Image (cartoon, grey):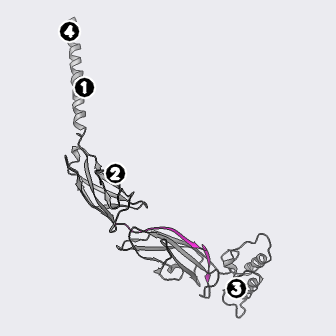
Amino acid sequence: MQKEVTKKVTGGILIISLLLLLGVIAATAVSPPPALPNKFWGNVSVNGVDAPTDTIIEAYIDGELRGTTTVGIEGEYGNNLNYLAVTGTLYDRGKIITFVITLPDGRVMTAQETAEWGRMQPPRKVDLTGVAPPLVTDPSANPAIIPDDTDDTPLWGEEAELSVTVTDICAIDSVTIDLSQIGGDSEAVMTDTGGGVYTIVTNASDGTTPGTYLLPVNATNAPGLSETSVSVELTVKKNGDVDDDGDVDEDDVVYLGCYALGVPGYDLNERIADVDGSGVVNLLDAVYLASHINGIAGYELLR
């Protein structure tokens, strides 16, 4: 009886041992065998210009980040034996390595070159090139609100300066803005005023529907790459609509008169209220607006 128990216990221990051993073998089988990283170095350029220092180079396999380095010398990465080390396993042999370039200004692009992950590879030189459209920031309109120009002769208050900042590590070829929504040119040229700031002064043509407009900018660099995702916001009001109700009527005359007399609670946008085009808002504007509304000859146009 005791021998039987001993046999059963011994058999159980053997089974457990075998199961544990099989588990270890199975775990070993699915664990990827380790391998030395692949190492890369070379030149790096964006839009035909050496990539600046602090540019980040990343390496991906199957969408997974496997290595990263930072450009320490303009136009070079992995120099002075500070290679871009790309980790992997034997299972990665033959897989494609994708390189991603991130400029200091935040623009991200995939390099045109790739490499193949291999086992026991010596350091390899792979020159990387990237292309990216310009960086367009800080869109603004000053002032942000203007009246429609009823006589198409811009006077004080009827124009706005639109501006954006355009930067790149290469030259900028052109910057235009589409003003067709407010009666302007669909490819109006913006002028470089220095420091990468491009501006244009515009009015809103007579009959422009009151509302807020997003005016698209098109910035193109020397290689011909364009950035078109940025717009300048400009609001157009009906000239003389000082109470901002969408109509020009006697209520606006009263509102304008109260403002000119300093009555509390009658704040307004003087650019909308200067209907006689004098550059000053006073009771004469209220008189002019009343004459316009009543159809008196000589007051057909709001200045």
Q: CA distance from mark 3 to mark 1?
A: 95 Å
Q: Quadrant of the N terminus?
A: top left
Q: Earlier in the sequence, mark 3 or mark 2?
A: 2
Report, in whole angstroms, how far the alpha carbon at label 4 lies from the one at label 2: 64 Å
Circles 4 and 3: CB distance less than 8 Å? no
Q: Amino acid at mark 3?
A: Ser
Mark nearer the viewer, 3 or 1:
3
1 or 4: tag closer to the N-terminus: 4
Q: Secondary structure at mark 3?
A: loop
Q: Which amino acid is tagged 1?
A: Leu
Q: Which residue is mark 2?
A: 68
Q: Which mark is residue 4?
A: 4
Q: Earlier in the sequence, mark 1 or mark 2?
A: 1
Q: Which residue is mark 3?
A: 278
Please report the residue visible at 55 percent of the width from the left and 70 percent of the height from the top.
Answer: 140
Closer to us: 1 or 282: 282
User: Amino acid under label 2?
Assistant: Thr
In what element is the residue under mark 1? helix
Please report the residue visible at 22 percent of the width from the left and 10 percent of the height from the top. 6
Seen at 43% across and 71% down, the residue is 228
- Spot occupied by residue 19 in the image (x, y as percentages of width and height): 23, 25
Q: Which residue is mark 1?
A: 20
